[in-house]
Protein backbone atom coordinates (compact mmCIF):
# COMPACT_ATOMS: atom_id res chain seq x y z
CA UNK A 1 0.00 0.00 0.00
CA UNK A 2 1.54 3.25 -1.13
CA UNK A 3 0.30 6.78 -0.57
CA UNK A 4 1.12 9.55 -3.03
CA UNK A 5 3.73 11.99 -1.75
CA UNK A 6 1.92 14.84 -3.51
CA UNK A 7 -0.14 16.89 -1.05
CA UNK A 8 -3.77 17.77 -1.65
CA UNK A 9 -4.88 21.34 -0.99
CA UNK A 10 -5.64 21.68 2.76
CA UNK A 11 -9.19 22.93 2.16
CA UNK A 12 -9.99 20.04 -0.15
CA UNK A 13 -8.36 17.58 2.26
CA UNK A 14 -10.48 18.94 5.09
CA UNK A 15 -13.64 18.61 3.00
CA UNK A 16 -12.97 15.03 1.94
CA UNK A 17 -12.02 14.09 5.51
CA UNK A 18 -15.37 15.47 6.65
CA UNK A 19 -17.24 13.56 3.91
CA UNK A 20 -15.49 10.34 4.90
CA UNK A 21 -16.28 10.80 8.60
CA UNK A 22 -19.91 11.56 7.76
CA UNK A 23 -20.08 8.43 5.62
CA UNK A 24 -18.71 6.32 8.47
CA UNK A 25 -21.15 7.83 10.97
CA UNK A 26 -24.09 7.16 8.59
CA UNK A 27 -23.36 3.44 8.24
CA UNK A 28 -26.32 1.60 9.78
CA UNK A 29 -25.24 -2.04 9.89
CA UNK A 30 -22.23 -4.33 9.69
CA UNK A 31 -23.49 -5.45 6.27
CA UNK A 32 -23.52 -1.86 4.99
CA UNK A 33 -20.02 -1.31 6.37
CA UNK A 34 -18.75 -4.47 4.72
CA UNK A 35 -20.27 -3.54 1.36
CA UNK A 36 -18.88 -0.01 1.44
CA UNK A 37 -15.39 -0.80 2.71
CA UNK A 38 -14.89 -3.82 0.44
CA UNK A 39 -15.49 -1.55 -2.54
CA UNK A 40 -13.67 1.57 -1.29
CA UNK A 41 -10.59 -0.09 0.20
CA UNK A 42 -8.16 -2.51 -1.37
CA UNK A 43 -7.90 -5.92 0.25
CA UNK A 44 -4.54 -4.86 1.72
CA UNK A 45 -5.94 -1.61 3.17
CA UNK A 46 -8.93 -3.38 4.68
CA UNK A 47 -6.76 -6.14 6.13
CA UNK A 48 -4.34 -3.60 7.65
CA UNK A 49 -7.21 -1.70 9.29
CA UNK A 50 -8.85 -4.84 10.65
CA UNK A 51 -5.55 -6.19 11.98
CA UNK A 52 -4.80 -2.91 13.77
CA UNK A 53 -8.15 -3.10 15.51
CA UNK A 54 -7.45 -6.71 16.46
CA UNK A 55 -4.06 -5.69 17.86
CA UNK A 56 -5.79 -3.04 20.01
CA UNK A 57 -8.22 -5.64 21.34
CA UNK A 58 -5.50 -8.21 22.03
CA UNK A 59 -3.22 -5.68 23.74
CA UNK A 60 -6.14 -4.57 25.91
CA UNK A 61 -6.66 -8.20 26.92
CA UNK A 62 -3.01 -8.43 27.95
CA UNK A 63 -1.86 -10.74 25.18
CA UNK A 64 1.88 -10.91 24.53
CA UNK A 65 3.59 -9.57 21.43
CA UNK A 66 4.56 -13.14 20.53
CA UNK A 67 0.98 -14.35 20.78
CA UNK A 68 -0.36 -11.44 18.72
CA UNK A 69 2.40 -11.87 16.15
CA UNK A 70 1.62 -15.57 15.79
CA UNK A 71 -2.17 -15.21 15.56
CA UNK A 72 -2.39 -12.11 13.34
CA UNK A 73 0.80 -12.61 11.30
CA UNK A 74 2.01 -9.05 11.98
CA UNK A 75 5.43 -7.71 12.85
CA UNK A 76 6.60 -6.65 16.30
CA UNK A 77 7.06 -3.16 14.83
CA UNK A 78 3.36 -2.98 13.88
CA UNK A 79 2.34 -4.15 17.35
CA UNK A 80 4.69 -1.60 18.94
CA UNK A 81 3.24 1.20 16.78
CA UNK A 82 -0.30 0.28 17.79
CA UNK A 83 0.78 -0.09 21.42
CA UNK A 84 2.13 3.48 21.37
CA UNK A 85 -1.32 4.66 20.25
CA UNK A 86 -3.29 2.74 22.89
CA UNK A 87 -3.84 5.85 25.02
CA UNK A 88 -5.05 7.98 22.11
CA UNK A 89 -8.69 9.10 22.30
CA UNK A 90 -9.70 7.46 19.00
CA UNK A 91 -8.21 4.12 19.94
CA UNK A 92 -9.85 4.27 23.38
CA UNK A 93 -13.21 5.17 21.82
CA UNK A 94 -12.98 2.27 19.38
CA UNK A 95 -12.08 -0.07 22.23
CA UNK A 96 -15.03 1.11 24.33
CA UNK A 97 -17.38 0.53 21.40
CA UNK A 98 -16.03 -2.99 20.82
CA UNK A 99 -16.38 -3.79 24.52
CA UNK A 100 -19.91 -2.35 24.64
CA UNK A 101 -20.96 -4.52 21.69
CA UNK A 102 -19.45 -7.61 23.31
CA UNK A 103 -21.19 -6.80 26.59
CA UNK A 104 -24.53 -6.25 24.82
CA UNK A 105 -24.22 -9.53 22.91
CA UNK A 106 -23.37 -11.42 26.09
CA UNK A 107 -26.31 -9.98 28.03
CA UNK A 108 -28.74 -10.41 25.14
CA UNK A 109 -27.94 -14.11 25.19
CA UNK A 110 -28.34 -14.33 28.96
CA UNK A 111 -31.66 -12.45 28.96
CA UNK A 112 -33.01 -14.49 26.05
CA UNK A 113 -32.08 -17.68 27.87
CA UNK A 114 -33.68 -16.49 31.10
CA UNK A 115 -36.88 -15.38 29.37
CA UNK A 116 -37.04 -18.74 27.61
CA UNK A 117 -36.87 -20.50 30.96
CA UNK A 118 -39.52 -18.26 32.54
CA UNK A 119 -42.09 -18.46 29.75
CA UNK A 120 -44.25 -21.55 29.55
CA UNK A 121 -43.41 -23.73 26.61
CA UNK A 122 -46.04 -24.20 23.91
Image (spheres, grey):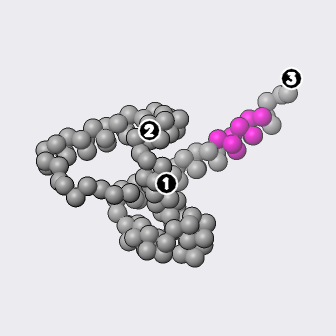
Please report the residue visible at 27 percent of the width from the left and 38 percent of the height from the top.
19
The quadrant the N terminus occupies is bottom left
Quick check: 97 left or right of 6?
right
Q: Quadrant of residue 115?
A: top right
Q: What element carries label 2?
A: helix
Labels 1 and 3: the sequence-earlier one: 1
Foreground residue among 1 and 56? 1
Dot in front, 3 or 2: 2
Alpha carbon distance from label 3 to label 2? 46 Å
Question: Which residue is labeled 2 in the image?
Answer: 39
Alpha carbon distance from label 1 to label 2? 13 Å
Quick check: 12 left or right of 59?
left
Q: Position of residue 62 (x, y in %)?
A: 55, 71
Can residue 95 be spotted in the picture?
no
Tell me the magenta residue range. 108-116
Labels 1 and 2: the sequence-earlier one: 2
Can residue 105 be spotted in the picture?
yes
Q: Label 1 crowding class (10 Å Cα cut-off): few <14, some 14-19, many 20+?
A: few
Please report the residue visible at 39 percent of the width from the left and 70 percent of the height from the top.
81
Please report the residue visible at 37 percent of the width from the left and 67 percent of the height from the top.
85
Q: Position of residue 2 (x, y in %)?
A: 34, 58
Question: Which residue is labeled 3 in the image?
Answer: 122
Q: Position of residue 103 (x, y in %)?
A: 58, 50
Dot in front, 1 or 3: 1
Q: Residue 47 carries which label?
A: 1
Q: What element carries label 1?
A: helix
Foreground residue among 90 and 8? 8
Amino acid sequence: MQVSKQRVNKTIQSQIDEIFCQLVSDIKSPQEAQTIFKDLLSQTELQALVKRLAIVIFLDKGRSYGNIKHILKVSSATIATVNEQMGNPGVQLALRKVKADAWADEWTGKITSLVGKLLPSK
